[in-house]
Image (cartoon, rainbow, N blue to C red):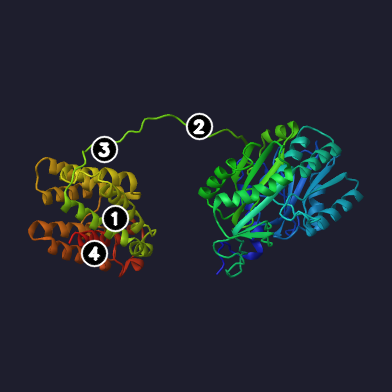
Amino acid sequence: MSRFFFNDRKHMVDDAIEGVIISSRFRNLTRLDTDPAIRVVVRKDWNKSKVAIISGGGSGHEPAHAGFVGKGMLTAAVCGDLFASPSVDAVLNAIVAVTGDRGCLLIVKNYTGDRLNFGLAAERAKKHGLKVEMVIVGDDVSLPDNKQPRGIAGTILVHKIAGYAAEQGKSLSDVRDIAQLACDSIASMGVAMQTCNLPGQNDEEGRIKKGHVELGLGIHGEPGASTIDSQNSQKTITALVKHLRKATGPEARLAVLINNLGGTSALEMALLTKELVHSELKEQIDYLIGPAALVTALDMKGFSLSAIALNETFIEALQADVETAGWQPLVKLDPMPLQKHRVIHGGTHAKPSENDAVKALVASITRTLIEQEDALNALDAKVGDGDTGSTFALGAREIAQLNDDGKLPLNDTAALLELIGERLATVMGGSSGVLMSIFFTASGQEVAKKQPLVDALLFGLEQMKRYGGADLGDRTLIDALQPALEALKNSDLSAAVTAANKGAEATAQMQKANAGRSSYVNSENLNGVKDPGAVAIAAVFAGMK
């Protein structure tokens, strides 16, 4: 099935345009009220006293193009259907609507449909006595021998520079010339690991193999120039930078636009930015734009880089304020600032000591949790985010390493429990690490007060319940831990192992979770699935035998 929110495929673009206009924080957009097939977004505050800047093309690239309409950038955007050029009539109506005596400049991406429809509209507008010029953006450098390079994300840099020149009151010829110089100064290249999906079409296996990325694919999903058999961020950035540096030259001072093609997470975009500023281009980059979704390709899992060779005019233009929803401010590239700080640990400073029996017990427990990592992750994937095994294994590996290195106070139970609590809080993620740290820390403090070990562990359990908010029957690890500790107090380790297993098994029949990650999951998904935390606790007790 298609992975899109929409009511009617035929009305998607119109609905999206309405959403863009009513959500504009500048309240400066409107739509031409004309034939419904003519989708033109214009500046509501436009008075035709300066050169008009018009761009557009197929929809599906949001925020381009309507998101760049506003003072300082576009005067109007002509929106076609998804990935389809707007009609000649739509472009002509846009020109007539916003063009005054100063004339207008059309900024067109280098696709055949856009060139033809914008070009014919320009010629017809001239018959109406209007002054019209056009520049064609072909910033894609992925196919260096292509005589007609595609226009991709670098197009919005041309919007910004041309819009600034027009806002300064420059003549149409001057605005055209600076826009053309910008076109000639920009190099862009995209990369993706998954191409885009179109609304209304069933999802199909894409052409890009798992574990690969495709370099140089277009903003409509057109095939790229080559593939890399890796999804490593550093290798991917290196491949793009090689092409950009060749196109712009090794001496150029650059601003680089980091564009999300629609389906890449903010986390990934941030780390890709880090890779960029540490790449071979690092000595040439003066400014960054983004990372942000600027010219997208629906939900394409990828990104693009656009580098522009700077001059003083371009810097001034790119730094100027605008009143548009989509533009991202130019950011001066400086090294990441670091603030000195002395690390504060709330921890213990126990002296390592030896105890062969305790060493073997710790080794057995940690080994058991590490061996159960994949099984616990698979179980957690049914009711959570699939990381319980990794979380417990991470803590187990830390304690196991300390055990192997002889750094644990094995002959001092109180200190051992407190040290384990401290390390688990540091290395285990999520709530599990904190809960287990509370358990071990509180237990260790009770042992230090000369309380029997099992009583101390039960006290640690009560503190865990107090701070965590869960209790017996809430479908958490407590359903295995509490009966096991109670059995250990009243009987022996074998009884505790049996009780822990029984408690873990019982969670599969609990229809509702009142605490923990599973409390966000509906009862149908919980039915018959054991709580992974409870299973982990059962594994711990099994590892003690």
Earlier in the chain: of badge 2 and badge 4, it is 2
The three-letter amino acid code for the residue at tag 2 is Pro
Q: Is residue 317 above or below residue 76?
A: above
Give the quarter of the image for residue 502: bottom left
Residue type of the residue flagged with mark 3: Gly
Mark pair 1, 2: CA separation: 40 Å
Q: List the residue tagged with mark 2.
A: 337
Which residue shows up at 78% across the image and 54% down it? 110
Query: Split into 4 quadrants, where in the image is the N terminus?
Result: bottom right
Q: Quadrant of the C terminus?
A: bottom left
Give the residue displayed 22% in from the left and 60% down from the top: 543
Residue depicted at 15% across the width and 45% down the height:
411
Query: Could you give the CA–CA distance between mark 3 and mark 4, rounded to whole angstroms?
Result: 32 Å
Element on which disc 2 rests: loop
Q: Nearer the viewer, mark 1 or mark 4?
A: 4
Left or right, 427 with reference to 10: left
436 vs 364, nearest the viewer = 364
Q: Residues within 10 Å of mark 4 (few under 14, many from 20)?
A: many
Give amino acid for label 4. Ala
Q: Residues within 10 Å of mark 3 (few under 14, many from 20)?
A: few
Identify the disc placed on residue 347.
3
Q: Position of residue 12 (x, y in %)?
A: 63, 60
Going from N to C along the chain, the mark reached first, 1 or 3, is 3
Q: Earlier in the sequence, mark 1 or mark 2?
A: 2
Q: Which mark is residue 515?
A: 1
Q: Residues within 10 Å of mark 1 (few under 14, many from 20)?
A: some
Count all numbered tags in the image, as a single digit: 4
| Residue 525, quarter of picture | bottom left
Apparent side of residue 2 relative to residue 45 in the rendered image (left or right):
left
**Mark 2 and mark 3 in contact (Cβ < 8 Å)?**
no
